[in-house]
Image: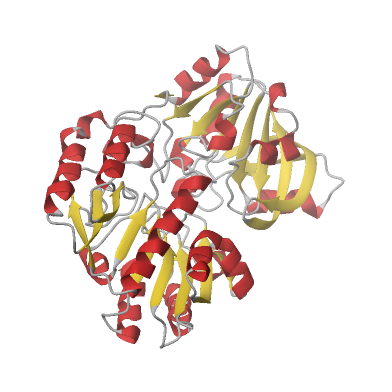
Amino acid sequence: MKKIAIGSLAQESNSFSPMKTGKGDFHVLRDPGEIIGKFHEAAQVFQDSGFEVVSTISAYALPGGSVVKEDFVSLAEELVDRIPPDVSGVWLMLHGAMYVEGIQSGEEYVLRRIREKLGENIPVAVCMDMHANHTQAFIDRVTVVRGYHTAPHEEWDYENCERITAKALIRAIGGEKMKTVMKRTAVRLFGENFMTDFYPAKQTVERSEEIEQIPGVIAATVFVGMAWVDCPYNTVSVVITVDETCEDVQEPLCRLADCITSKQNEFTIPAKNMLLNEAVDYCEAFSKRAFYISDSGDNVTAGAAGDNAYCLHFLLQSGKKGYLIAGILDRPFVERCFADKHTARLYCAIGAAEDSNSTKVETEFEVLARFSSDVGEVKNVKLAFAKAGENYLLVTDKRCSFTFEEQIVKYAGPLSAYTGVFVKLGYLFPDLVKNAAGYVIALTPGNACLDKKQIVYKNAT
């Protein structure tokens, strides 16, 4: 029986964050059943076509700072070592914006090592995030590339991307000749500039899907890129995979790239966005709850530290009441809360626990509750629910993002009790949107700042 190897090594890097991503930050699966279950759509396509699915590893870390070289190489080499030399093809899920100290593109490194082991003729298909930064060397080494078409990402989109790349890989194994080409634009965008429910991102994705209907075109993706990586290849790119029946790949490639370039000034943040004081005033005009305010500069899902008390400082200084901040990373604060569970009040500092450039607040806190639990994919998180002045906050000992309403309610109670809820995000994730009375993106400072004028690039062109 012919074999197909599957695996994943994924993280979205933010090179402006001081918090490096190490081996301990990766959640690594090695059990074949768990890996096949994680990528069940691709695995099912292979199994239905009579292939034996051989798992390697699945390693995922939350968005964060650049990856430590030695830790990355260790995981990458383990993935490659687990690929049998007699495989007929390789299927991978890679993010696309993994930035490794001393290496730069982690994805390029993985593909180079696979080619060194298997040669140039074994087809490799890669399913990727929309926010990928591509090097030409990476594109030259893959057979099939397809990225997600939704932002915020939807579950059906993950599954669809898996199926498309898996089916294409089987065709390539069967002897069909394929090639993947890229055209990079000079347009640099944040993810918040390209929300696919809004113009012009929606129309751009629709155009890529129209191109996928052209005979001979297998996959077409607009990769927005990750602008918080200081590298020469962090601008929007268009990637198309075609088979040998496609007569002219350059025409649709240039058409899609020209669509980006011609509308570059129209890719503004479609959601309501404003300075923090304006965002709070906007929130208080709503009589319904829950209302979310994104602390976008400290957006954990864009790799920011998550330890900035900037919003708490504003609330206390301006005399605002009834807000919840979910949450702030501060391990020392949480450890103090857990050290003496009988302590109800603490006078101490919070914020800037990891990033010295973050805002720190020193005041009295009332500790209301303590929890030990998982927050999404982050395991064994300790949380303290506390009150500062007339506002509330969830403080964690690990970086994590609150992207589901039930995660917040579990620790802070019904959201209708609060004037507004701050989250360390940019755009809201679908589960928060569905029950929100409204939301606004606050243009706050931090590692994921949405003000291009405040970002100093040293290596980007």
Residue 101, x across and y down, in percent: 36, 68
Position of residue 317 relative to residue 368, above or below, is above
Foreground residue, 142 or 135?
Answer: 142
Foreground residue, 334 or 194?
Answer: 194
Foreground residue, 313 or 405?
Answer: 405
Residue 99 lies in quadrant: bottom left
Tell which residue pokes out farthest to the bottom in this image. Answer: 85
Left or right: where does residue 108 sit relative to residue 319? left
Residue 27, x across and y down, in percent: 58, 65
Which residue shows up at 18% across the image and 60% down it? 245
Left or right: where does residue 233 sit relative to residue 351? left
Left or right: where does residue 55 sit relative to residue 125? right
Residue 288, x across and y down, in percent: 63, 15
Residue 244 lies in quadrant: bottom left
Which residue shows up at 44% across the image and 39% down it? 297
| Residue 101 visible | no
Foreground residue, 161 or 344?
Answer: 161
Left or right: where does residue 101 sit relative to residue 183? right
Which residue shows up at 55% across the image and 38% down it? 309
Residue 189, x across and y down, in percent: 29, 41
Tell which residue pokes out farthest to the right in this image. Answer: 342
Position of residue 43 relative to residue 416, above or below, is below
Q: What colour-coding does the image apply?
A: secondary structure
| Count of residue discs | 0
| Residue 368 visible | yes
